[in-house]
Image: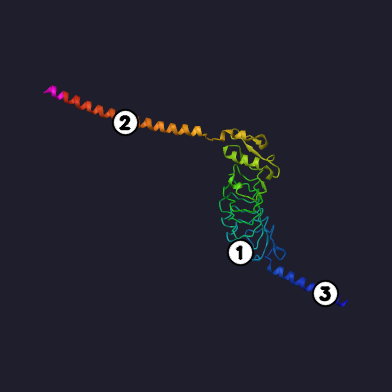
Amino acid sequence: MLPCVCWLQLILILLSSVLWTLGENCPATCLCPDPHTVDCSGRGLTRLPDEIPLDVRRLLLADNWIPRIPSDFLVLYSDLVYLDLRNNSLSHIEPGTLSTTSRLVFLDLGSNNLTEIPKGTFGESRSLIKLRLGNNPYLSMVNEEAFLGLTSLRELELERNALSTLKVGALSQLPSLRVVRLEGNPWVCNCNFANLFTWLIENSHKLPNGVEGMECSLPMDGRRVSLTQLSKDSFRECQATLTLTDLLIIIFSGISVSVVAIMTSFFLASTVHCFQRWSKGTKGDEEESEE
């Protein structure tokens, strides 16, 4: 019986020591359910909490009022693999926030106030697998090179933003992309949308619901139509490709115009010269007759 009591006492001492350590390293008002997780969700924070353990791996900051992330944040927390900043007040992400040395695998920036995703925002973070950018009601611009270098990214969420167009290059440069969400955006069915439409049709297997859940507005009357009602022929007028014959006609027309212009200039110059000689001859004849 005594050995069991001793073992129980030892376990209680170790447990107390672990809990004391967790309490010591855990930021005020936050919870730390394990040595590498810090949960500060729904704490009414207006900035990142102080004294986050440097070895943190999962940082939960959802449902707060945090307006910005310092550009050197992930340099300090190099072990961080999971960062949840959903439903905060972020209006922009400083370029270089995610560096090439970052180990971040999951990043949630959904339900914020982001307006654009410029080039270099994610700094070629090659470890990132899932990126959530959905439900940003003011996000209307994504640079064509915004995701450059995210070679491991498999899931990208851009649903329910304010995107009316998106360059195909922003998606085609993601070699590992398996799932992309784009529904709920105010897409416009004009020539700027033509290439994206083709990409969506060819990669519909990457869309959770295919193109069925996506709509775009017609440029003439603003009427919303489902992408299932469109085809590549709907954008036929946008395909301004030139054949070899067209190019030869353009080149020949340009040469012809140049030749005509040169001949016209030569004719005008000759006419002026002859007129000047004729004027001088007429004037000389008049002077001789007067004498």
Q: Is residue 288 visible?
A: yes
Write the start and end of the magenta stretch as one range: 286-291
Q: Is residue 239 left or right of residue 83?
A: left
The circle drawn on residue 7 is 3
- Residue 19, relative to residue 171: is it above or below? below
Image coordinates of residue 287 in percent, x first then y, are: 14, 25
The one of 11 and 252 positioned closer to us in this rendering: 252
**Circle 3 SS class:** helix
Name the dominant secondary structure of the magenta segment: helix
**Circle 1 SS class:** helix
Counting other residues with Cα less than 10 Å from the Cα at mark 3, is it few (<14), some (14-19), or many (20 or more)? few
Q: Residue at x 12, y 22 (%)?
A: 290
Where does label 2 land, which residue?
266
The circle drawn on residue 76 is 1
Looking at the rendered structure, the number of numbered marks drawn on it comes to 3
Residue type, label 2: Phe
Q: Is residue 138 visible?
A: no
Counting other residues with Cα less than 10 Å from the Cα at mark 2, is it few (<14), some (14-19), or many (20 or more)? few
**Circle 2 SS class:** helix
Image coordinates of residue 209 in percent, x first then y, are: 71, 43
Image coordinates of residue 127 in percent, x first then y, are: 64, 57
The one of 132 and 280 positioned closer to us in this rendering: 280
* Earlier residue among tags 2 and 3: 3
Residue type, label 3: Trp
* Earlier residue among tags 2 and 1: 1
Q: Residue at x 71, y 70 (%)?
A: 21
